[in-house]
Amino acid sequence: MVARFVNGKNIRGMLQYNENKVIAGEAKLIMASGFAGEIEMFNLEQKLQRFEHLTILNSRVKTNAVHITLNFDEQDKLNNELLQRITMAYMEKIGFGDQPFLVYKHTDVTHTHVHIATINIKQDGERIDTHGIGWKLSEPARVQLEKEFALVQAKGRQSSNSLAIKPANIEKVIYGRVPTKRAITNIVNAVISTYKFTSLAEFNAILKQFNVIADRGDENTVMRQKGGLIYSIINNKGEQVGVPIKASSIYQKPVLATLEKEFLTNVEKRKQYKEPLRNNIDKIFVSYAAISKQTFVAEMQKQNISVVFRTNEQGYNYGVTYIDNNSKAVFNGSDLGKTYSAKAISDRLSSMDIPLSGELKKMQGTSKNITPSNDVHEQKAYLKPPEPTNYLKLALSKYQPEAAPSITRKRKKKKNKVHEQGQGLNQ
């Protein structure tokens, strides 16, 4: 289970986001704690009044809306009753058990998850301190609940090979069958809450997997000068389709200033995933005597890792981004080390594919020229293609043309001469 805790100032926006999901058939209200009467009969304004009744008790607190998501692994089979029990136990453990809250089960992505809408003002007007609540209360609660309800553990597990976020359906957007704003909002919020990126370029590399792009506008535009940001749906050619949406109009407001805070936070969060990613790249290269760009990208995709090369008009690779959809961590090539930069990877790629047999892989594993140890990631020698050792010659032999007749005759002549000398000695 993965829990995410977000504070905000817009209670109405928080409710509207979830209620719009219900209207669209992508969510269902499965629990209402602290509400009197039949919650199914309440409209948006009545639900909002329940929260505002408490917020007026402490008007000094402006950041009073709390939006929590509980995300479960696809292997967790949870019905509504279990989700209600898990949610109630979680809210008790983080000190929100006595607060009014609404629980929405969302179905817009492949894994089960719930959104919890509540506030941090208590009945006596006192504010609930949420500073550090993630590591102080939420994280211990997560660990306890995973054990109590036999859930798949969030730490130390291998993620599913499928992307949990559904890409925007371009055809439906073009023909108006899906509102552009709703499609973009679902994807942007899901990416921000699950992936670890440290720049707008990395953020866009992720979004493009789901047919969305964040655009700052051209260099000299007013939007660029004021730090504005819009989101658009793109087709398979990277062209924008539908109506672009201002970042400020999306719930949780993923404007550039908000994203820049995420950039700083994610620098530390993604560190633990750097070495495993480098190892995955190394494993592919040691499995081939020669490997093409297309095959390298395909082999990485088999491991649920997307490799995005940035190429200029002349076909030169000037950048590369690795998106690990298992750990949800994103790295530019240079962040992993010089060996994994666009230039270094391009130098190691070939125009052909020559897979190594099992025996050759074992022999290659003993070669210092090809397999880098942990302390030589930055060595320039590793950037150069290895010299053709015996096992590489063996692998390449079937691609070599037959020897020229003149060479064959010379070898035969030499053998005959040696043979004649041997006969003379024997006489």
Image (spheres, rainbow, N blue to C red):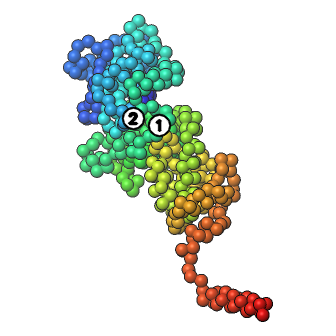
In the image, what residue occupies the spot 36% across and 22% down? 87
- Estimate the x, y position of residue 74 in percent, counting from the top left: 36, 37
Q: Is residue 199 above or below residue 96?
A: below
Front one among 9 and 140 = 140
Residue furthest out toward the top: 124
Q: Judge left or right: residue 15 versus residue 155.
A: left
In the image, what residue occupies the spot 49% across and 15% down? 129
* Amino acid type, mark 1: Arg
State how far apart marks 2 and 1 are (Cα): 10 Å
Q: Judge left or right: residue 391 versus residue 70.
A: right
Q: Mark number for residue 157?
A: 1
* Amino acid type, mark 2: Asp
- Toward which corner of the image does residue 356 lie, by quadrant? bottom right
Q: Is residue 261 above or below residue 352?
A: above
Query: In this view of the protein, can residue 18 be seen by the observer?
Result: no
In the image, what residue occupies the spot 46% across and 44% down? 325
Q: Quadrant of the N terminus?
A: top left
Q: Judge left or right: residue 283 versus residue 251.
A: right
Which structural element holds mark 2? loop
Label 2 belongs to which residue? 73
Query: In this view of the protein, can residue 261 be seen by the observer?
Result: yes
Which structural element holds mark 1? loop
Front one among 141 and 410 = 410
Q: Earlier in the sequence, mark 2 or mark 1?
A: 2
- Estimate the x, y position of residue 344 in percent, counting from the top left: 61, 57
Front position among marks 2 and 1: 1
Front one among 8 and 417 = 417
